Image: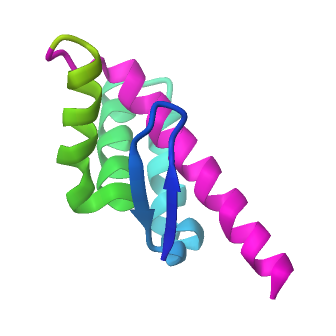
Amino acid sequence: MIEGKTSSGFEFTVDERILEDWSLVEAISMADSDDESEQIRGLMNLVKIVLGDQFDALKKHIADRNDGYVPSPEVSATIVEIIKTSRAIKNSQSSEG
């Protein structure tokens, strides 16, 4: 498991196996689509794959910082940050071992 913290202070745990899972690739591809509906489905899949049960905690974290509102661009940016941070942690752990 990879544990980290975003720049806004959200603490997360990610199963390192998902970073190489094909489902993650599919979700990223969908989120990067030109079709807005596909983007939304892709983002939702990303959130479920990366955070699972932690998503409610992320929504609360974001809502607490935004007067109860959970802006989707902030969710998107946070998910991207979590993936990048998790990959960096995983890579640093791999180079140590």
Up the image or down, 37 lies above or below 66; here it is below
List the single residue furthest toward the front: 9
* Residue 94 lies in the magenta-colored region: yes
Name the image quarter holding residue 48. Answer: bottom left
List the single residue furthest toward the right: 95
Up the image or down, 86 lies above or below 36; here it is below
Name the image quarter holding residue 10. Answer: top left
Q: Position of residue 5 (x, y in %)?
A: 50, 48
Instruction: Give the residues in magenta.
Output: 68-97
* Residue 73 lies in the magenta-colored region: yes
Q: Position of residue 22 (x, y in %)?
A: 52, 69
Of residue 80 and residue 88, the one placed in the foreground of this image is 88
Q: Position of residue 37 (x, y in %)?
A: 30, 28
Of residue 72 and residue 2, the one placed in the foreground of this image is 2
Which residue is located at x 21 percent, y 23 percent? 63
Up the image or down, 35 lies above or below 10; here it is above
Of residue 67 and residue 74, the one placed in the foreground of this image is 67
Which residue is located at x 53 percent, y 74 percent? 16
Q: Is 64 displayed left or right of 7 in the figure?
A: left
List the single residue furthest toward the bottom: 97
Q: Quadrant of the C terminus?
A: bottom right
Of residue 33 and residue 72, the one placed in the foreground of this image is 72
Up the image or down, 56 lies above or below 60; here it is below
Which residue is located at x 40 percent, y 56 percent? 12
Secondary structure mostly seen in the magenta stretch: helix
Q: Is 96 displayed left or right of 68 in the figure?
A: right
Q: Position of residue 76 (x, y in %)?
A: 43, 31
Which residue is located at x 40 percent, y 51 percent? 11
